Image (spheres, coloured by chain):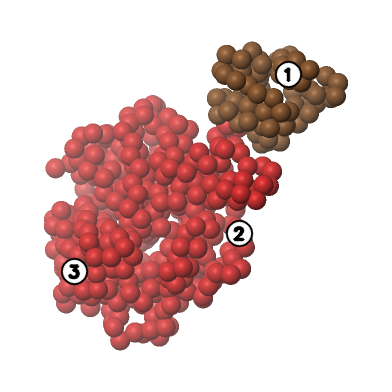
Amino acid sequence: MNKAELKSQLKTLMVEGLKLEDVQPEEIDDAAPIFVEGLGLDSIDALELVVLVEEKFRVVIPDEEVGKVAFASVNALADYIAAQQT
Amino acid sequence: MRRVVVTAAGSINALGRGVAAFAAALREGRSGIGEISLFDPTGYRTRYAAQVAELEPPAGLSPAVLRRASRSDLLALVAAEEALRSSGWQGERDGIGLVLGGSTGGMLASEEYCRRTTLGIAGAKPSMALGTPVSTSGDFVAHVYGCHGPRLAISTACSSGGNALGIAADWIRQGKAQAVLSGGTDSLCRMTFSGFNSLQALDPAPCRPFDRDRAGLSLGEGAAMFLLEDLDHARARGARIQAELLGYGVSADAHHITQPRPDGGSAALALARALAESGVSRDDIDYVNAHGTATPANDATETRALKHCLGARAYRIPVSSTKSITGHCLAAAGAIEALACIIALREQFVPPTVGLVHPDPECDLDYVPGEARPTALRTVASSSYGFGGNNTTIVLRRFED
């Protein structure tokens, strides 16, 4: 799967998996922060998103340190997943 | 001793959104019990419950709150919003305390989470189970409306709402807070339906309190919230005073996990303690809003308790069950019924027991069958008898300077 497709799937996963009623996947900026600013998700969303991403893309986010970097933005997450899958 | 007054109220239940909608239904003797649509009742003894028709969240809630608030939380938020808005409270709400009765909490959402994870259906978000503790509703209300006073969740089954009001009044008398947002909330869910169904405590038809043919209760859902306030504080800010909470009494059956003690002895004790704390005699009570669940056991026991405590007075005053109108709203019941009493005091009428058609020789008091009755009311009592023998009675009076 190419990066564009991966990012699209990630955005759909976020909106549908976290039930973000007021956001369309296409509206999510690739480079914008996901937490606190930007999309404005909080720590509970973070926990849920980790589970959703690990299940769907068969990757592991071993700890908070790794998670912080991987989940900085949609771009960062796509890079992390792509790296894990090679 | 400090006097405790009610300076605002908020309501949502099967009769509608807002205190006015509830008052109209009480006046008209209109029941909110109908066929449940929240989930499929196939296989249960009954299809009936008093379900809230449309649950629109209050305006202005953040997306994060909307994503996570359970049905019980939303009911509490709606009622709290109306109470705070109508209270005329100016400025910071920092010192406002919060005591909220709850029993099922986020159970409806947790059930859905468990159902999906067990059956492998998509859409099971762990945060659906986060709202399970009953304290969550109070947390949401305090968070959304900025109340930073002391906060407590009360969970004593069907008497939670009454106990919450009593505790809030105690805090005001003790000087812990000058104003406390207090009441109860509960939503319908499969667990309570199943639970009461297993106990064979649900009437296949809409409930008929004190009727010879009564066959059990009808569940309901909703929330009622009040701003309870120290009288001096209320006067100083020019608040409109709706009623006075004179006192409350609590007792415990220590008899059985669900059945009341048959002689009604400790239910009578709760009423006696409420009268004593309120400084009123049995002859001062003009109306009793009964627990009146319409189970064969409760109604007979409650009748005995009333006679035991009030003596001959029990035969001379109206006693009605508004659960015939609102259904049994569990932890919200005591608060919803306190609101019925406040409306009754304000408008000087007694709400009826709907569905009471055939008198039961064992229940021979005046239960105001069918129609509301204009009545001079000064002091009233509202009783709630929770599972496990948690008996609570509160006493309310028209405000007199």
- Against A54, residue B240 (above or below) is below
In which quadrant of the rendered view does residue B135 lie?
Answer: top left
Q: Are marks 1 and 2 on the same chain?
A: no
At x 33%, y 61%, the residue is B387
How dense is the environment of label 3, judged by Cα within 10 Å: few (below 14), some, or many (20 and up)?
many
The residue that label 2 is drawn on is: B39
Residue B317's spot in the image, x, y percent?
25, 73
Residue B338 seen anywhere in this rendered image of the structure:
no
Amino acid type assigned to the residue bearing label 2 in the image: Phe
Q: Residues within 10 Å of mark 1 (few under 14, many from 20)?
A: few
Other residues around mark 2 within 10 Å, as few (<14) / some (14–19) / many (≥20)? few
Position of B372 with respect to B305 (left or right) is right
Labels 2, 3: one chain: yes
Question: Rounded to the nearest whole Å, what is the CA distance between mark 3 and mark 1?
Answer: 70 Å
Q: Chain of mark 1?
A: A
For marks 2 and 3, give the CA distance: 39 Å
Say which residue label 1 marks: A84
Which residue is pictured at 46% across the width and 63% down the height? B195
Disc 2 secondary structure class: loop
Q: SS of the residue at dot 1?
A: helix
Q: Nearer the viewer, residue B12 or B66?
A: B66
Q: Looking at the rendering, which quadrant does residue B61 occupy? A: top right
Mark 3 element type: helix
Q: In the rendered view of the protein, which quadrant contains the N terminus of chain B?
A: top left
Observer-nearest residue: B395 or B102?
A: B102
Residue at horizontal 39 percent and vertical 27 percent from the top: B91
Q: Residue at x 60, y 20 (%)?
A: A62
Q: Compared to A36, does A56 lie above or below?
A: below
Counting residues from the start of the chain, the first of labels 2 and 3 encountered is 2
Q: Are marks 2 and 3 in contact (CB under 8 Å)?
A: no
Q: Indicate the position of residue B151 as horizontal and vertical percent values.
A: 33, 36
